[in-house]
Structures are given as C-alpha cells and as structure tokens.
Image (cartoon, rainbow, N blue to C red):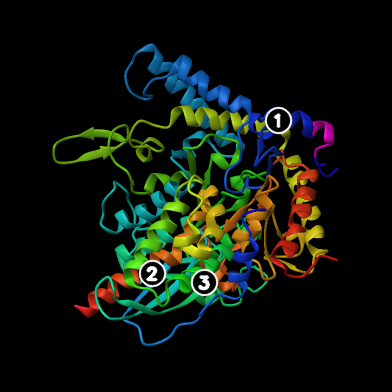
C-alpha cells in the first residue's frame, strides 16, 4: 500500500516537536512557514542532542586520550553511522563538511589539486586539464555551478551545460554531444530547488559512466524529502546539507564510492587529516579523516544524527507522500488563479515540493511582502539560481517549499494571502 | 498595508522621466544581488561645483514596486535642482530609510520620498529603495570627475 500523508492528529503531534512553529509574526499572525527549502526548523530532539553533547561529552574529537575525548569521538563516529544508514551507505563513505556548498567545493578542488599531482590523490581520474570538460545543467543552484566555473578557470578545462526547456525540464536532446569522452565530471541536481523538477538520476549517471565521466549529485532538495538509497541512484559522489532536514546549521555531508574517495585528492589541509608530517611534506589519513581538516563539527553531526532518527521514525515514504499531497493542493490552487504562472513541470509525478511561481504584473518582492504581512513566509528572489531565471525569462520568482510539519491549512493560508496581491497592486482582480 | 501607499504605486506604474537619454556625463549600473533587480541611471549636469544644476536624470529600472518608485521619486525630486540640493536630499533619504522607522522623513526636503518611510521598518527592503540613490551618487561622482 502506498504511504499516506500525515493525519491531522499526527501533524498536530509532530508540530508540537518544533518549538518555533508556535510563535507569531508581524503583529500576531500565526507563523505560516513555507520556506523549508531554504532551511528547515529543528525539533526539540535535535536541539537536545546538540545540547547534550556540549553538556556531557564536549571535546576536540579524534585528539587526545582523555575520557571526554573518547566519548566525544564515540558520539561523533556513531553519528556518522546513523547518517550513513539514513542514505543506505557505510560510515566510512560519509565525510562531514560545514555545508553542502563546502562538500561540492571539496570535489571541485580535488579535481584541481589532482591536475597538479597534489593532495595525496592517485590515479588520473581527479586530474582536470585543458581539453577536459565539466558538464553541469542550467538548473543548478549556484553551489553546484560556481565551484565548477572556478575549477575550470584554474585548470583550463571547459565548462558546458545541459539546457533547460521552457517547462523546466532538462533538455537532453543534445546530451550525446555535450557528454563525451572529454567529459570528466557530470554534476547535476537531483531535485531543482526552484522548479521542483526531479531529474532521472539513474539514467544520467549511466550516461556519464558510459563516457567514463564521474556523476556528482546535488541532493540538497532530495535527501530531506524522499527516501534515498545511494546504492540505487548510481552516482559516484553526492552532497547534501543537514540544516534543510531538521539538522543543525553548520554540517553538510559528502558521500562517495569508497574506491573514489580513496583516490580523491584532499581539499582543506591541517590538523586531524594527517598520517605523518615533516617540515617538508605530509602524508594523509585514510578516508574519511583525510577530508576533515580541523576540529570536526561534532556537536552538529550529533544533532544531524538525531534529525535522521527523527525522520526515520516519521518514515521517509510518509514524509514524501505528505509533501506530494501539499504540492498537489498548492498546484491545484494556483491553477485556479489565471494571474499566476507556475514555473516548472505541471505533472506532480515529475516534481518535488518546491513550487516557484510568478504573479502577472507584480514583482516577487512585492508578492512576498504582501504574504509576509499575513505571516506567510516564502522565499523571493532568484533562489541562488540566477542563470535558470534568465532562461525562464523572469527576473526572480516567489517560492513556497514544504517539510513534514507543513499543513494543508498553511497551503490554503498562502492562497488566501495571495488573493490580496492583485487588489493591492491594481492588477487583475481575482474572480 | 501602509508600505504600499498610493503614491508609491503611482510612481511604480508610471515612473517619472523613465528611459535613458543623452547627453550625460555620468552613468551607473547597480544590481541588488538578492533578487537580481537592476537600475542604470545617468546624470546630466550643467555648470560646476555644488551650484551646478542636475539638468537631467534618466534611468532604466527593472525591479519591485519599491525600487521603481524610488527611482521615479529621485528623478522627480532632483531634476532641475542643484548638486548641493541633490546631496542634501540623498542624505535625508538615506537617514530616513536606515532609521528602522525612527525618522519619518521631512516632506520639505525629500518631497514624495516620505511615501517610502514605511520601507524603513523592513530591513530586507531598504536595499530596494536605496538602489537608485546609490546609482545616482555614483553617477554624480563620475559626472563631476568627467568635468575635471
């Protein structure tokens, strides 16, 4: 049987776990938070886990031999196991970073370091050179675009990109000429943070592998919202952030195939990531430590593990079903308003729970302001995907995004607040 | 919503003196990176020093109602006045917009600019209202430099 959305009773219980959801904003309006795609709120169990770490086991992990260091290290490494299990991976394949942006930069810098024989890598796979190509897509978040622009600039490699169709899908018509034996990396997003488009990850990864390229996945908008098993996806490296999935700020994850992580040159260097050091040179620790320079983000990792446990208890299939129900409700509501244009696929099966739209004749900043006046908090702007907005010929957009705690009533509150917009700006009056 | 006064909506729908014109001595292009709003603004001066006259302010503005209205108010208030007057008006606008709502603005100094006083209560929107003013001060600086 397909998983069901949360019932009203379940939602009420779930929402009670998130203290911030009970606050009011803008002169007493209940908070209607529809910006979980930017960052999610945190349940008490996550806050408690982080606090417990600081109160009981705080230490610089993987350093020293005193009892706190032992216990702190143990908490950090068991967090790694929990987080790995959440995506169907082994603990040794999970690298902690500060955020997903750093995880993607780590990979892009590995390719740069590899070109110069540095970073302790081996093999030729992570060497980007003139004549090589990096393929991205036009729907990428800046975090999966700019690191590659810079890697190409540093190495002389060429950046290419898969275009996006008018209805917000990847245009794969010319993929054969874009993805060639020159391509070393194909970096793409699982779910667009603007359009909600869900890309065919398996197929794209297979196409990358067919020409010998590595497939790098930005999973920031999928890991928090869908059941993910890295062994099913077929990609080589995958990045996501903790704070979008009920975890604390300041922790991201890079997952990679173990043999690739072993080959891959390091990015940040310093303490914790070494094996031996002399004044002239150093050798590096095994994976994952060689990618975790400096005192690790232990309390944040512990908090993220608590978030994974929380999501697992909810059931990721139910989280997904719930957000799909909300997305359908919002798309249906927006479709009844001819003065609203939804960006991205109209078909629910091809999209996740991020819905960006344009209101005829009204700038998104003004739309957001009117919504905010009623306590409805959405994202306005280009959502760190400026090239995508240029392609869609809109300067910016208004985006609603969901999490497990979002209610159908909040979707209705958005639609109701939205109906004030044409009246305030003297554009078309809603029928 | 007191933010969207009639005056602001009027200015945003029918921006005063909209469009880019010649001649001009200084031009500035400013972008708001959070939303991608853009303004290009030109200043044409006659004369030199603080008593020089701002003969024309021409601009192309793409953005929200606040940023377009602010550019329109700028053109209305500064065109035909002296450079000294323009600087005083800019200072008064900036003071009002960055006052977090403490400074209601002086209509004798900033004219229709007082309609933007509500923006000061929304820190995320202050940049929208100041975008064209930043372009103006930059264009003025260039225009005065071109006269040297």
Residue in view at x 59 percent, y 59 percent = A365
Whole-percent x and y of residue A393?
A: 59, 74
A424 versus A110 height, above or below: below
Label 1 chain ID: A
Asked if the residue under mark 1 is in contact with the one under mark 3, i.e. CB atoms within 8 Å, the reply is no
Label 3, on which residue? B72
Q: Is residue A209 magenta?
A: no
**CA–CA distance in space, label 2 to label 1:** 57 Å
Label 2 chain ID: B
* The one of A361 and A304 positioned closer to us in this rendering: A361
- Tell me the quarter of the picture where residue B81 sits: bottom left
Q: Is residue A210 visible?
A: no
Label 2, on which residue? B136
In-image side of A344 versus A266 (left or right): right
Whole-percent x and y of residue B34?
A: 49, 58
Neighbours of disc 3 within 10 Å: few (<14), some (14-19), many (20+): many
Q: Answer yes or no: are tags 3 and 1 on the same subunit.
A: no
Q: Is residue A353 visible?
A: yes
What span is colored magenta in the figure? A6-10
Label 1, on which residue? A313
A79 versus A138 height, above or below: above
Q: Magenta: predominant secondary structure element?
A: helix
Q: Answer yes or no: are tags 2 and 1 on the same subunit.
A: no
**CA–CA distance in space, label 3 to label 2:** 12 Å
Whole-percent x and y of residue B134?
A: 39, 64
Asked if the residue under mark 2 is in contact with the one under mark 3, i.e. CB atoms within 8 Å, the reply is no
* The one of A40 and A170 positioned closer to us in this rendering: A40
- Tell me the quarter of the picture where residue A203 sits: bottom right
* The one of A219 and B55 positioned closer to us in this rendering: B55
Q: Answer yes or no: are tags 3 and 2 on the same subunit.
A: yes
């Amino acid at each position: 049987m397909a998983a069901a959305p949360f019932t009203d009773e379940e939602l009420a219980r779930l929402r009670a776990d998130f203290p911030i959801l009970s606050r009011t904003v803008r002169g007493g309006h209940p908070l209607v938070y529809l910006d979980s795609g930017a960052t999610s709120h945190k349940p008490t169990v996550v806050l408690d886990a982080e606090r417990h770490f600081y109160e009981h086991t705080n230490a610089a992990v993987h350093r020293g031999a005193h009892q706190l260091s032992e216990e702190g290290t143990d908490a950090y490494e068991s967090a790694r196991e929990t987080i790995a299990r959440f995506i169907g991976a082994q603990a040794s394949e999970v690298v902690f970073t500060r955020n997903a942006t750093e995880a993607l930069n780590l990979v892009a810098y590995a390719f740069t370091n590899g070109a110069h024989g540095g970073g302790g890598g081996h093999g030729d796979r992570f060497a980007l050179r003139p004549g090589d190509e990096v393929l991205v897509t036009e729907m990428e978040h800046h975090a999966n675009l700019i690191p590659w622009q810079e890697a190409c600039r540093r190495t002389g490699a060429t950046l290419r990109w898969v275009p996006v169709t008018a209805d917000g899908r990847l245009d794969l018509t010319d993929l054969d000429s874009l993805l060639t034996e020159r391509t070393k990396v194909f970096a793409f997003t699982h779910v667009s943070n603007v359009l909600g488009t869900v890309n065919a990850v398996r197929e794209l990864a297979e196409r990358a592998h067919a020409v010998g390229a590595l497939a790098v996945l930005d999973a920031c908008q999928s890991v928090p919202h869908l059941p993910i098993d890295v062994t099913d996806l077929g990609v080589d490296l995958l990045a996501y952030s903790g704070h979008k999935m009920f975890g604390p700020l300041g922790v991201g994850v890079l997952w990679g195939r173990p043999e690739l992580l072993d080959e891959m040159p390091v990015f940040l260097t310093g303490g914790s990531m070494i094996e031996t050091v002399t004044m002239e040179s150093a050798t590096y620790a095994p994976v994952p430590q060689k990618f975790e320079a400096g005192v690790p983000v232990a309390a944040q990792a512990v908090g993220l593990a608590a978030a994974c446990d929380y999501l697992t208890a909810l059931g990721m299939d139910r989280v997904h079903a719930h957000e799909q129900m909300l997305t359908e409700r919002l798309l249906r509501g927006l479709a009844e308003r001819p003065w609203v244009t939804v960006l991205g696929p109209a078909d629910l099966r091809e999209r996740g729970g991020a819905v960006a739209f344009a209101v005829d004749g009204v700038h998104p900043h003004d739309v957001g302001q009117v919504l905010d006046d009623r306590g409805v908090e959405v994202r306005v702007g280009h959502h760190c995907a400026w090239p995508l907005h240029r392609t869609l010929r809109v300067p910016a957009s208004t985006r609603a995004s969901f999490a497990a705690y979002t209610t159908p009533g909040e979707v209705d509150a958005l639609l109701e607040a939205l109906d004030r917009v044409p009246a305030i700006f003297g554009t078309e009056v809603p029928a | 919503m007191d933010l969207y006064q009639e005056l602001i909506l009027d200015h945003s729908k029918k921006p005063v003196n909209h469009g880019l014109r010649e001649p001009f001595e200084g031009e500035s292009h400013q972008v708001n990176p959070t939303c991608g709003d853009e303004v290009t603004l030109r200043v044409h001066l006659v004369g030199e020093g603080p008593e020089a006259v701002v003969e024309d302010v021409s601009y192309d503005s793409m953005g929200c109602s606040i940023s377009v209205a602010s550019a329109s108010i700028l053109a209305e208030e500064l065109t035909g006045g002296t450079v000294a007057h323009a600087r005083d008006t800019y200072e008064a606008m900036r003071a009002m917009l960055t006052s977090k709502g403490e400074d209601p603005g002086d209509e004798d100094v900033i004219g229709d600019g007082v309609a933007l006083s509500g923006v000061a209560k929304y820190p995320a929107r202050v940049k929208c209202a100041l975008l064209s003013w930043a372009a103006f001060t930059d264009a003025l600086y260039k225009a005065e430099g071109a006269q040297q």
